[in-house]
Amino acid sequence: MLASAAEPAAVGPRATILDVMAILKVARLGHPVLRQPARPVPPAQVPSAETQRFIDDMIETMREYDGAGLAANQVHSLQQIAVIEVQKNPRYPDAPEIPLMVVINPVVTALTEEQENGWEGCLSVPDMRGVVPRYTSVRLECLDREGNPLSVVAKDFFARVIQHETDHLNGIVYVDRIADMRTLSHIAEWNRYWLGIREQSE
Ligand SMILES: [Zn+2]
C-alpha cells in the first residue's frame, strides 16, 4: 500500500518533469508490516520498471525524512529491499558519510563477536532514541539495483546502519535490540540529558 502518486506522464518532452518520484508513507511502530519478514526479490524482477521506480521512491522518501536508511517494510512493502545513505544528515550530524547504496536480498554475517553500544533512531519510531548494541564488523552480501551480486565488509557506523536496515527486513525494530530500556528517550529529553554523556556513534 503505497502513497498515491501522480500517474506517469504520457510520452513527450515533459515526461521527465511530470513523472516525478513519490514520497512514500512511512509505517510507524505498531503497524503489523514492521513485524513481518520481507520476501526475497526474484533476481529477474530487479531490472523491471516497477522495481526500479520503487527503489527511486524509497531513496526519495529516505532523503525527504533525513533517514540514514529505509527498508521496504517501512513503506508498506514486504520486499527485501533497503536503501542506505548518509550525507551531512541533520538527524545524525556527527555520522560519517555513507554513499548511496541499494541493498536487495541481503545476507549479513557478523565478522566479530564484539558489539558496541550506540544511539539509534528510526523513521518508524518518530522522535525517539535508544542505545543498541551492534556488531562492529559485518559482511553484507546482496544484489545491487542492477541485480549484480555485491559483497561489502562494513565497520562501526556503516555496520550499524546495515544491521538496523536488514533487521527491518526480518521484522525486527531497533527497540527490540535495546539492552537497557532506560535509555529509550524522546529526542527533546535526549538532547537535554543524554547528548554528549554517553559515547555516541550515530
Ligand atoms: Zn528503522
Image (spheres, helix red, strand yellow):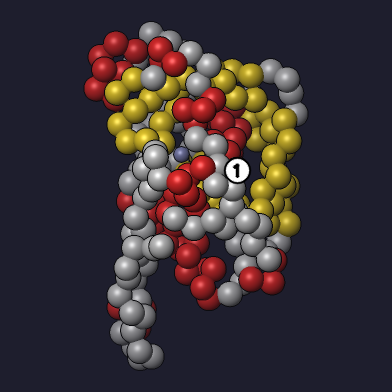
Up-down relation of residue 138 to residue 64 (above or below): above
User: In the depicted view, which residue is nearer to us: 24 or 34?
Assistant: 34
Q: Quadrant of residue 192?
A: top left
Looking at the image, residue 170 sits to the left or right of residue 182; the answer is right
Q: Position of residue 9 (x, y in %)?
A: 34, 84
Q: Position of residue 29 (x, y in %)?
A: 39, 38
Say few, some or many: other residues with alpha carbon within 10 Å of mark 1 (under 14 / 14 to 19 / 20 or more): some
Residue positioned 41% across, 62% down in the render: 1
Residue positioned 29% across, 25% down in the render: 187
Residue positioned 34% across, 55% down in the render: 25
Looking at the image, residue 173 sits to the left or right of residue 163; the answer is left
Residue positioned 64% across, 62% down in the render: 41
Q: What kind of residue is marked 1?
A: Asn
Q: Which residue is mark 1?
A: 170
Q: Position of residue 116 (x, y in %)?
A: 59, 18
Total marks shown come to 1
